[in-house]
């Protein structure tokens, strides 16, 4: 009780919040104001963070939940707790925009950095949430380095990613990857890509050693040293991949290895290791166009095993991620 609360009181408060029991939350906090600073919510940032996240139940904030947040702010909860943790967690879902509106109306800063190092706008980028990203930009959020952070996120959803890129570009966002062809491939802008290839046909063979993104939620492989075809495979840009192949891209082009000899993967490695078999259409396209499934490469392993390096074929690499096994592995097995 040295901090003004006990484990049982924290459990009771969390349960009251989850049940949207506003009278009980009010009674507990009026009886013990120290609960406003209790370690609840994401990273223990406070009860207001837990309220704003609407995590239990996972529903849009109703009138009671919004009233709870407003009452807590008026009676001792810091809207800025944890470096705008309440706003950061609300930004994870477009359904929580009413909560975002309430928090900002009470002073939350859309340009703050959670815990001093993670800009709030990054949350919308990490979640590939164009609605909340657009809302933040409309309410004064600066693009900053958000475009590069967006490209580095592990979620793969071509439509949402394209909408997020468009929102950031319209807001003046810039990328350190100053390559129009790269963004055209990622966004699936085939007409734009074709025009760029008309001007510079050699783009289909160019390697890009500065592409330090491309990891997934499990796989630590990046696009460093790869070609535009590698990029198309990673971001599931089927039409872009088809165009690049039609323009002479090598389906078996190996990415440049690093100083330790790690790398050398062909584009099919990226397509074969997408979550929920989302890369299967591109895997099939590559096989039709002559992808050599016997090629081996030394590549980074799973993020849960830092520093792991494996040497394997595309099939062997796909099998390293058990949560992603399925039709892709079956297809590759049938081809080898």
Image (tube, grey):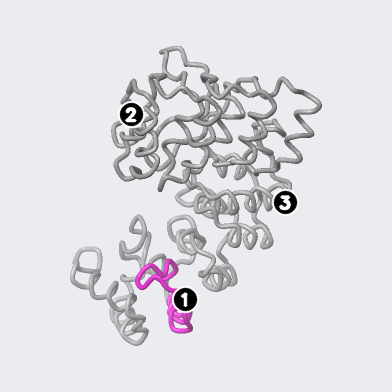
Q: Which residues are magenta?
A: 51-72
Q: Residue 146 placed where, x, y %?
A: 60, 45
Q: Residue 151 placed where, x, y %?
A: 57, 41
> Label 3: few (<14), some or many (≥20) within 10 Å?
some
| SS at mark 1 in the image | loop
Mark 1 and mark 3 residues within 8 Å of each other at the beta carbon: no
Q: Earlier in the sequence, mark 2 or mark 3?
A: 3
Relative depth, front residue between 152 and 202: 202
Q: Earlier in the sequence, mark 1 or mark 2?
A: 1
| SS at mark 2 in the image | helix
Whole-number angstrom distance, CA of label 1 to CA of label 2: 45 Å
Checking the image for residue 61, the label placed there is 1
Checking the image for residue 303, the label placed there is none
Q: Residue furthest bottom?
A: 23
Q: Is residue 317 above or below residue 135?
A: above
- Residue denoted by label 3: 171
Q: Residue 93 placed where, x, y %?
A: 50, 63
In the image, what residue occupies the spot 45% across and 80% down?
71
Q: Is residue 57 magenta?
A: yes
Checking the image for residue 316, the label placed there is 2
Q: Quadrant of the C terminus?
A: top left
Q: Is residue 265 above or below residue 184?
A: above
Looking at the rendering, which quadrant does residue 312 occupy? top left
In the image, what residue occupies the spot 38% across and 26% down?
300
In the image, what residue occupies the spot 33% across and 82% down?
30
Relative depth, front residue between 37 and 15: 15
């Amino acid at each position: 009780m040295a901090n003004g609360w006990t484990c049982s009181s924290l459990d009771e408060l969390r349960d009251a919040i989850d049940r949207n029991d506003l009278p009980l939350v009010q009674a507990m906090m009026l009886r013990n104001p120290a609960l406003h600073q209790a370690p609840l919510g994401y990273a223990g940032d406070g009860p207001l963070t837990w309220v704003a996240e609407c995590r239990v139940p996972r529903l849009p904030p109703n009138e009671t939940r919004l009233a709870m947040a407003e009452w807590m702010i008026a009676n001792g909860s810091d809207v800025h707790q944890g470096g705008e943790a309440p706003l950061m967690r609300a930004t994870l879902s477009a359904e929580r925009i009413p909560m975002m509106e309430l928090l900002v109306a009470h002073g939350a800063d859309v340009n703050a950095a959670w815990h001093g190092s993670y800009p709030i706008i990054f949350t919308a980028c990490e979640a590939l949430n164009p609605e909340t990203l657009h809302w933040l930009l409309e309410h004064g959020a600066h693009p900053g380095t958000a475009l590069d952070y967006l490209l580095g996120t592990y979620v793969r959803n071509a439509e949402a990613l394209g909408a997020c890129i468009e929102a950031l570009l319209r807001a003046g966002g810039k990328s350190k990857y100053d390559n129009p062809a790269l963004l055209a491939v990622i966004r699936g802008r085939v007409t734009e890509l074709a025009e760029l290839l008309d001007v510079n046909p050699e783009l289909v063979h160019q390697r890009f050693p500065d592409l330090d993104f491309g990891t997934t939620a499990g796989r630590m492989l990046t696009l460093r040293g790869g070609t535009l075809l590698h990029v198309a495979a990673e971001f599931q840009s089927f039409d872009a991949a088809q165009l690049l192949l039609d323009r002479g891209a090598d389906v078996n082009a190996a990415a440049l290895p690093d100083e330790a000899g790690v790398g050398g993967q062909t584009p099919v490695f990226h397509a074969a290791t997408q979550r929920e078999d989302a890369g299967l259409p591109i895997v099939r396209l590559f096989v039709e166009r002559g992808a050599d499934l016997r090629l081996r490469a030394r590549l980074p392993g799973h993020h849960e095993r830092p520093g792991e390096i494996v040497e394997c074929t595309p099939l062997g690499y796909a099998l390293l991620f058990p949560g992603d096994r399925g039709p892709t592995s079956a297809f590759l097995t049938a081809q080898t």
